[in-house]
Image (tube, coloured by chain):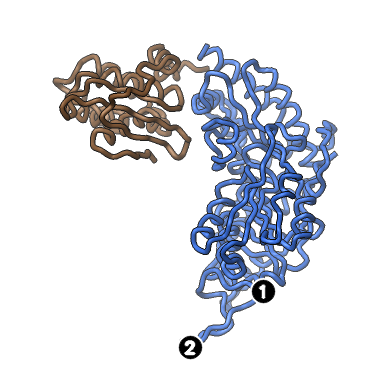
Amino acid sequence: MFDDLRDLYQEVILDHGKKPRNFRCPENATCLAHGNNPICGDTLVIYITLDGDERITDAAFQGEGCAISVASASMMTEILKGKTRAEAKTLFEGFHDMCTKDDFDVSQLAGCDEDAIERLVMLSGVKEFPIRVKCATLAWHTMQAAVEGDEEISTE
Amino acid sequence: MSMDLSQPVISSGDNSTSAYDLERIRADFPILKQEVYGKPLVYLDNGASAQKPRQVIDAMSDVFENYYSNVHRGVHWTSQRSTEAFEAAREKVQVFINAASVNEVIFTRGATESINLVAATWGRKNLKAGDEVILSHMEHHSNIVPWQLLRDEIGIELKIAPIDKGGNFLLDAFEALLSDKTKLVAVTHVSNALGTVVPVADVIRLAHEKGALVLLDGCQAVPHAVVDVQALDVDFYVFSGHKLYGPTGIGVLWGREDLLNAMPPYQGGGDMISSVTFEKTTFMKTPHRFEAGTPAIAEAIGLGVAVDYVSGIGLENISAHEQGILQYATEKLSAIKGLTIIGTAKEKASIISFSVDGIHPHDIGTFVDRAGVAVRVGHHCAQPVMEFYGVAATARASFGLYNTRDEVDVLADALEQTKEFFA
């Protein structure tokens, strides 16, 4: 019955959903943002530690959400470590397009971390479930707000 | 035995629905033949919006195909016919809720607008800083936010009547909140998130003893049981058409005629005035005073037919059927390990909110959808009650007059399989 849901709910995603990585509040975070999805009540806080305003040395999160939003946040925190703000922004925009645009071309992300792209492509399975796209992108929207100094973000 | 919404009695959940022709009722709803992902649609989201019977769909098509026109102004054949049908719908609603006069039935866009109307007109005119309005902890946002707007504007105080862990309305605690400052009690008749039937007869009696008026949000009550506004002795009663098997964009504000005629207009425009000069305008009496502009004509007529439809089956029979389904579903879902029913009040309408250990409601919603089952997931526009239970969201199955025990089985089976997937 759930065969076609396997494309979205892959083992890796289920694992991150159940055992989220970097699920903590780092004391030395340099920026944070609250993200919420008012339609469904998901809430996240994303903590980013920037080294000299440019490179992300730590990323973590706390909050509550569905398997997809928690997995997305968890995987994002792993991906972000060591990336510059510019790289994070490129990945965010690429992931957003991946989840929403039919004509997305992965070459848009040429030069980015291959492992990161692979994980994002996996999560972009939400494209087939339009109502769930916000679940997958909430963490990334919130991260973007955090590094740009906005403390509140909501995806609607 | 039916659920008597005017009395705080415990319903027995009687299963004797043999006279209830479920097959024939289901045949009236074209959408129930729909398949989703190759499986029959199991529609358990009636609390959000109910499906429409053929009779309502046909009546609305009939308006547009045969006699549509604006109402209350034309001398021509179509306008007269439309006006007659529109006003006949008002009379049907009057009978449906046993209003004393047809003038007490105001058509609005829905319950939300009905509450906003009372807040903006009765509230602004009669409330002043320091006056108190009592809500309950399980209100829908539509019965919270209009009063907060008024609080911010004129400085009224909002008091919240508490519930217990089961979701029962605590009458003693409510009584303790009442004072000479209480001017209005605005509470739900049946909770959309928990299914709790509020003991409104007692609420109204106690409020009136203190001289306060009572507004009931009847959205989740009118589809499930007989509502008699005179027997309730309530002051304002609101509901939406679309949860009563009627169309969207139409709802009802019922109020006592003397109260309504003492209220200022809500919006200004055509259809609500006696005369207009640039110096002075005089307004019509209720209901037209509150119906500025061209109304939702086909929708009102559709609502009238929906009222005919449920009255034809009989609210007592619908209530008995749904209570049987509620009891069956409560037993069936309770048997699922890790599933917790949120809202276990002594008297409930056919609404079951629940959570499943380790699986977020959104994931539940996506999974049971693949089994053809439509349930609501989220906060149900009732965040304060979600907060009370310490959850951000629940899944909710809400049953209507066409739902079957087999459909409950489909839901239960889909939930078991979802659990296996996440195990």
Q: Residue at x 56, y 64 (%)?
A: B129
B234 lies above or below B340: below
The circle on residue B279 is: 2
* Residue B169 spot, x, y in % from top left: 71, 42
Q: Along the polypeptide, which appears first: circle 1 or circle 2?
A: 1
Visible residue check, residue B270: yes
Tag 1 and tag 2 share a subunit: yes
Amino acid at pointer 1: Asn
Amino acid at pointer 2: Glu
* Residue B161 spot, x, y in % from top left: 66, 46
Q: Quadrant of the N terminus of chain B?
A: top right
Q: Are marks 1 and 2 in contact (CB under 8 Å)?
A: no
For chain A, give the colour: brown
SS at mark 2 in the image: loop
User: Which chain hosts label 1?
Assistant: B
Chain letter, colour blue in render = B
List the residue tagged with mark 1. Answer: B261
Measured Cα–Cα span from mark 1 to mark 2: 22 Å
* Residue B286 spot, x, y in % from top left: 65, 72
Res A29 → quadrant? top left
B75 lies above or below B164: below
